[in-house]
Image: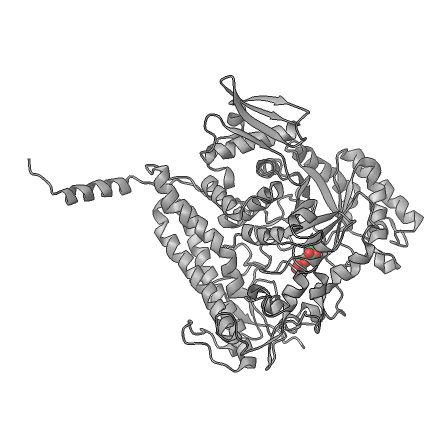
């Protein structure tokens, strides 16, 4: 027998190993339940008991007498326990002697669906409404699947329709339909809520007014609540957008938000329902939109009924890639507050861009408001959490496998805001992507899980960088997908990017210091001074709080102008890094998921360059400075971007060509600025 040299033998052996690694077939429709055992199987493997001494939604998993047990405070707690065990098994954390006791941090963990009765979804990027309002029957199987997914991460409430609500939501036909959906969701521990339109009594029954102090109006809402509870005995309550972006509300009758919320609260109270009253209010006349929620709501602190909770967006403007936390979280003391996060990526590339939001939400939850001294984190100030859902009729629910990570992260953080974004990312990757056959767990962890986890962790900062770095915000146009810093679209100044970036030949940024809009003073000390002072203002919020000259020197020693260019470039290069990594991951991921992600990462990189060309190119018309030599040069002259728009389909989804470039077209009509 001829002896092969060792190196040759080793080579043959390695080749055999790698060729026997075959990616698992999967298409993303199992979401994060892909790697776990079926629920029924996990349930059948344990002994269960309801122990009223445990917290209602809490559970205890432990081993005793040669068996695994799950004790829980209620049926819902038991379900959470089974899912927790399923997750632990999938993550390899369910070995003998397991002992895990948990209860949710927040009682209300709610998804807000901005779904319309015509089946469109406002800011929805995963197809039409999954509730299928216009179909003859409700989509039962789909709703069950949704129920499982929500329950598996502890979500216990669902607001079925858009906050820009339709009065028909409250007619008999829709109440009956909502009742059918609620009957299914109840099985998964999920309460059903609806968004109401303030003027419903006028539209539906011809009342002359919507005045919350008018006895007829009050009686109408009371009767309506009784009617709903007759159909849905455990109905959760109302979510309300009032006196906001053109929606009517109590202020139209000279009344306050508290008057309005309390009227509804009174109607719901006998049934145990709640009102979630949104603080997303702003008027076109204000010099700083970021100041308005505090201006309107602080004077009402302590006036809201005990079954009212004020729902506040994480930032003071509107779900931008980076905002400081809303100052309202540090101001209200005698009002229940609820966080509103946006899971759907309205400003972070829709369902095209890979942007893991666990990091963004943690940044907000961990921020110290100093309301009751140091340690008053936003997470501790709020008593409930809502997330604007990213679900639709798409088979994978979210339009992109990586968008599923955000639904997952929302649920996990609502359950336990102390989890880290890293842990959640790691859990999600391991449960979502199946290990290829013939690959050891260790190899899979190293070659696939770790790099994908790293992509997730870097992704939000990449978006901030190529869209709106250094505290810039609201630079988008049209459908909110792409850049339009030049946009001066009527009718409102506070819908125009120039209101926010304020670029001129002297510099750029919004002066929110004491000598500007004084937004800094809405924050408690030491934050007010930290933001006010250029030496201490965090660089990633610099242009949020300050208007600075183009040649202002940053910590790096470079000028503001150069740093702006550098950040845009860094965002693009980070996405290029994701693309490169993804190429290397091809052997370990199913072809369907690999192709989907590859195409979307290409789109993301191209979109990133479009954001850069538009913003850097436009700001250069003011700065008059060259783009530094160590960054990638601009690709498209600014002249050819201004006044052109992205081609979108009928649902507002952006169109890209074969190479993944955004299709930018001339406007059909000139709109007078
Ligand atoms: O950010 C804006 C969105 C609107 C949304 C509004 C809100 C539902 O662009 O689509 O309306 O916020 O939160 O009410």
Residue 450 visible, this orientation: yes
| Viewer-closest of 204 and 492 | 492
Q: Position of residue 651 (x, y in %)?
A: 60, 57
Please give left or right for residue 67 compared with residue 185 in the image: left
At 41% from the left and 51% from the top, the residue drawn is 595
Q: Position of residue 169 (x, y in %)?
A: 75, 46
Q: Quadrant of the N terminus?
A: top left
| Viewer-closest of 517 and 568 | 517
At 55% from the left and 32% from the top, the residue drawn is 83
User: Residue 443 is drawn in which quadrant?
Assistant: top left
User: Measured along the vertical axis of the image, is residue 300 above or below residue 672?
Assistant: above
In the displayed image of the protein, which residue is found farthest to the left? Answer: 1
Q: Quadrant of the C terminus?
A: bottom right
User: Measured along the vertical axis of the image, is residue 181 above or below residue 501?
Assistant: above
Residue 472 visible, this orientation: no
Q: Position of residue 385 (x, y in %)?
A: 66, 46
User: Residue 320 is drawn in which quadrant?
Assistant: bottom right
User: Measured along the vertical axis of the image, is residue 623 above or below residue 47?
Assistant: below
Please give left or right for residue 207 compared with residue 447 in the image: right
In the displayed image of the protein, which residue is found farthest to the top? Answer: 65
| Viewer-closest of 273 and 223 | 273
Q: Position of residue 44 (x, y in %)?
A: 53, 22
């Amino acid at each position: 027998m001829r002896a092969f040299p060792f190196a040759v033998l080793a080579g043959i052996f390695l080749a055999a190993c790698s060729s026997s690694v075959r990616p698992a077939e999967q298409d993303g429709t199992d979401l994060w339940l892909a790697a776990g055992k079926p629920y029924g199987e996990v349930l059948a493997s344990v002994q269960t008991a309801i122990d009223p001494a445990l917290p209602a939604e809490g559970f205890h998993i432990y081993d005793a007498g040669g068996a695994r047990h799950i004790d829980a405070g209620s049926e819902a707690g038991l379900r959470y326990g089974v899912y927790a065990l399923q997750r632990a098994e999938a993550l390899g954390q369910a070995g003998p002697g397991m002992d895990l006791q948990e209860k949710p941090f927040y009682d209300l963990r709610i998804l807000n669906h901005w779904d319309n009765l015509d089946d469109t979804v406002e800011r929805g990027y995963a197809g039409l409404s999954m509730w299928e309002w216009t179909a003859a029957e409700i989509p039962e199987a789909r709703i069950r699947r949704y129920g499982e997914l929500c329950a598996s991460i502890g979500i216990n409430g669902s607001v079925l329709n858009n906050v820009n609500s339709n009065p028909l939501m409250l007619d008999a036909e829709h109440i009956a339909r909502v009742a059918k959906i609620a009957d299914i969701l109840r099985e998964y521990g999920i309460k059903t809520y609806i968004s109401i339109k303030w003027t419903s009594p006028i539209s539906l029954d011809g009342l002359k007014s919507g005045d919350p102090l008018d006895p007829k109006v009050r009686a109408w809402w009371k009767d309506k609540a009784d009617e709903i509870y007759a159909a849905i005995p455990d109905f959760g309550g109302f979510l309300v957008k009032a006196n906001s972006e053109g929606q009517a509300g109590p202020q139209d009758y000279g009344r306050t938000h508290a008057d309005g919320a309390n009227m509804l609260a009174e109607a719901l109270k006998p049934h145990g329902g709640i009102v979630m009253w949104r603080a997303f209010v702003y008027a076109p006349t204000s010099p700083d939109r970021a100041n308005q929620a505090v201006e309107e709501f602080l004077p009402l602190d302590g006036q809201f009924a005990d079954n009212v909770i004020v729902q506040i967006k994480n930032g003071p403007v509107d779900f931008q890639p980076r905002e400081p936390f809303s100052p309202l979280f540090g101001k209200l003391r005698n009002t229940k507050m609820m966080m509103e996060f946006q899971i759907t990526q309205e400003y972070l590339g829709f369902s095209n861009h890979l942007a893991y939001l666990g990091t963004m939400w943690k940044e907000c939850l961990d921020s110290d408001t100093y309301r009751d001294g140091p340690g008053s984190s936003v997470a501790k100030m709020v008593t409930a959490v809502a997330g604007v859902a990213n679900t639709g009729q798409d088979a994978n629910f979210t339009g992109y496998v990586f968008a599923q990570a955000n639904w997952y992260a929302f649920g996990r953080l609502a359950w336990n805001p102390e989890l880290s974004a890293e842990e959640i990312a790691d859990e999600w990757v391991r449960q979502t992507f199946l290990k290829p056959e013939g690959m050891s767990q260790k190899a899979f962890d190293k070659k696939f899980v770790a790099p994908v986890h790293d992509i997730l962790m870097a992704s939000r900062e990449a978006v901030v960088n190529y869209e709106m770095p250094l505290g810039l915000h609201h630079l988008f146009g049209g459908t909110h997908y792409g850049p339009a810093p030049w946009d001066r679209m009527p009718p409102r100044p506070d819908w125009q990017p120039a209101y926010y970036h304020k670029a001129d030949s002297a510099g750029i940024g919004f002066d929110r210091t004491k000598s500007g809009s004084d937004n800094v003073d809405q924050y408690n000390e030491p934050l007010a001074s930290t933001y006010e002072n250029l030496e201490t203002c965090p660089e990633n919020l610099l242009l949020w709080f300050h208007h600075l000259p183009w040649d202002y020197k940053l910590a790096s020693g470079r000028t503001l102008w150069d740093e702006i260019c550098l950040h845009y470039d860094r965002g693009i290069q980070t996405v290029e890094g994701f693309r490169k990594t993804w190429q290397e991951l091809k052997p370990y991921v199913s072809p369907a998921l690999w192709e989907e992600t590859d195409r979307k990462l290409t789109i993301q990189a191209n979109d990133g360059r479009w954001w850069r060309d538009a913003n850097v190119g436009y700001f250069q018309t003011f700065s008059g400075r060259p783009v530094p030599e160590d960054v990638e040069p601009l690709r498209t002259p600014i002249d050819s971007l201004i006044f052109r728009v992205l081609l979108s389909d009928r649902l507002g989804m952006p169109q890209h060509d074969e190479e993944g470039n955004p299709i930018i077209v001339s406007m059909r009509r000139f709109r007078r600025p």
